[in-house]
Amino acid sequence: MQYIPGLAGVPVTESKISCIDGQKGLLSYRGYDIMDLAEHSSFEETTLLLLFGTLPTKAELYEFDQNLKNARRIKFNIRNIMENLPSTTHPMHMLQVVVASLASFYPSTEYMNDGSENQAYVNDVTVKIISHMGTLVAMWEHMRNGYEPIAPRTDLTYAENFLYMVTGKEPDAHWARLLDACFILHAEHTINASTFTTMVTGSTLANPCSVIASAIASLSGPLHGGANQQVIEMLEEIGSPENARAYIEDRLSKKKVIWGMGHREYKTKDPRAKILQKLSDKLLKNKTGELSQIFKTAVEVEKVCEELLGHKGVYPNVDFYSGILYKEMGFDAGLFTPIFAVARSAGWMAHWREQIQGNKIFRPTQIYTGAGNACYIPIEQRG
Ligand SMILES: CC(C)(COP(=O)(O)OP(=O)(O)OC[C@H]1O[C@@H](n2cnc3c(N)ncnc32)[C@H](O)[C@@H]1OP(=O)(O)O)[C@@H](O)C(=O)NCCC(=O)NCCS
């Protein structure tokens, strides 16, 4: 038996949901290039594509959209749970706690009892989780700052409603379209740590709310989704393009990672980073006539990293530019990873649904490297 650290390159499933070409820097959902989806689709349509495998008809999209809208409100007992969390709770930790609690509001008895899936329940809980995710993150943004949360609306798209609930203002169509594109780009990404977590927890036939809570925990780490918050903090610390080289060289000499750089699958620039960089560039020039200091610093960091890390196949990943865009939209850095989680709930649910069809519980093995034949010594004789 050969041990492969981090399961690098080890297939753990057969999946029809998404595909990465790490050498060419390509990503597709159900065969559709994400460039096309980011430009022409909506988060709602892309979610349906991920869940069911085909682009929906108008009627199917309308019905799904209505279901998502109608599931935006949350029960006041769920809000009570949020009210009892310390206001210092990171939005990812809030999300993990509250999504786990949804299992007691939406129990999965039919599904659990005989191990088979009840399609009506599967569809209903899919909509509830994806819809609630945005509401919870937006509500907590106000609650953690000591304000009354803003109620969701049913006349807005997913992205518009999220913007409205966070800012309290009528959503700007331009920002909403950009946020929608960000949601599409973050919706799915093959078998990364949080998706694998979804599959492992799902394979035990745990309640889907518990499954997604475990995926949220996995995404929260700085080596995964948590990196987008670290990136913006790093760029702010660097301060200006002139400081980039010295900062990067110093970090590398101390064997520290550069946040937002590198990816297990891509050995070239992450295609999502390319799209986000283009969007940020266009957006910032449109809005302010020039690029912000933080964007210019990011471009310089990328240049230095290409020179110093390119030979290792380390290039910007999706988190490198997403934080800059979110900052320009006025979001607090604590919201960056939760926004990622909101979007990724679509991919997680698609993988959960795929997992429970023909499920086999995950139970890998190990290479034991511990002691053998140890003889128990009573505590009195151990000195
Ligand atoms: C994403 C990540 C965990 C992938 O890790 P991995 O596939 O195990 O890659 P490795 O750690 O084996 O990296 C291979 C080499 O590149 C280097 N490297 C990878 N990412 C790096 C980074 N962000 N900064 C500096 N060096 C990096 C490693 O030090 C290693 O160098 P070595 O061969 O001299 O030891 C890693 O690139 C990372 O920590 N990135 C920063 C966090 C981040 O942005 N995460 C979001 C991912 S979407």
Image: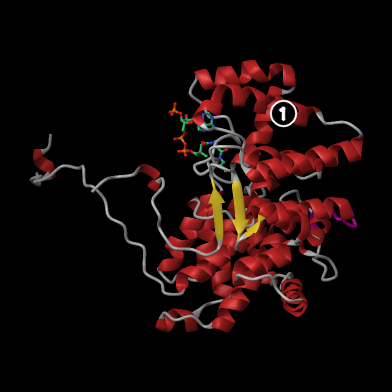
Quadrant of the rendered image containing residue 349: bottom right
Q: Residue at x 51, y 18 (%)?
A: 253
The residue positioned farthest toward the front in the image shown: 24
Residue 211 forms part of the magenta stretch: no
| Mark 1 CB lies closer than 8 A to ligand 1 | no
Q: Amino acid at mark 1?
A: Val
Residue 327, position as x, y percentages in the image:
77, 40
Prevailing secondary structure of the magenta residues? loop
Q: Is residue 213 above or below residue 289?
A: below
User: Residue 320, how many percent across, how many down?
Assistant: 66, 37
Q: Position of residue 318 (x, y in %)?
A: 64, 43
Residue at the image point whose x is 11% and y is 41% from the top: 380
Q: Taking 174 as reference, is 46 above or below it?
A: below
Residue topped by disc 1:
299
How many numbered callouts? 1
Which quadrant does the C terminus fall into? top left
Q: Is residue 217 visible?
A: yes
Residue plotted at (44% across, 81% down) = 116
Is residue 38 found left or right of 313 in the rendered image?
right
| Residues rendered magenta in the picture | 165-172
Q: Quadrant of residue 261?
A: top right
Where residue 5 sits in the image (x, y, percent)?
A: 36, 42
Q: Relative to residue 373, is residue 347 depicted above or below?
A: below
